[in-house]
Image: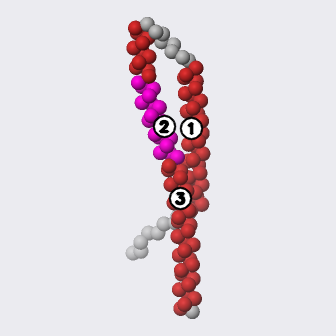
Amino acid sequence: MGMPGYEVNPEQIRTSGGGISSSTQQLKADWAAFQAELAGFGEPWGTDDIGSLIGGCYQAVYEVAVEAYDDNLEDMAEHGEILTVFADNHAKAEEHNVTEINRVRDVLG
């Protein structure tokens, strides 16, 4: 019973990496627009005691959310780059293998 094979298509992988990168750029732009929109609201909870508590809670939650979202966007960007590098390396390895096989064939005649 033979081993099941697999096929790697570097161009499809490269396209997927580009898609992830494009999506990441769009998400970054949307995130920046959303943050600007939030900033435009100012502090609608007011400055009294309850408003100050709400503002403090909002700021703490907002900072955690910003950090998490920024980290996720950074990870997505890295994944897009990794896929592109993987595709390039696989294509180079295939080219190298073909060259070496041709050399062996030439030597064996």
Name the residue rendered at 57%, 32% in the picture: 32
Q: Earlier in the sequence, mark 2 or mark 1?
A: 1
Residue 54 % position (x, y): 42, 15
Q: The residue under label 3 is which amino acid type?
A: Val
In the picture of the structure, the residue carrying the numbered disc 1 is 27
Which residues are drawn in magenta? 60-77
In the picture of the structure, the residue carrying the numbered disc 2 is 70
Looking at the image, is 54 positioned above or below residue 9? above
In the picture of the structure, the residue carrying the numbered disc 3 is 85
Q: Which mark is residue 76?
A: none
Residue 83 left/right relative to 57: right
Residue 58 % position (x, y): 44, 21
Name the residue rendered at 54%, 90% in the picture: 107
Residue 37 % position (x, y): 58, 24
Question: Which secondary structure class fits the magenta region best?
Answer: helix
Name the residue rendered at 55%, 22% in the picture: 39
Instruction: Mark 2 vs mark 1: give the one in front.
Output: 2
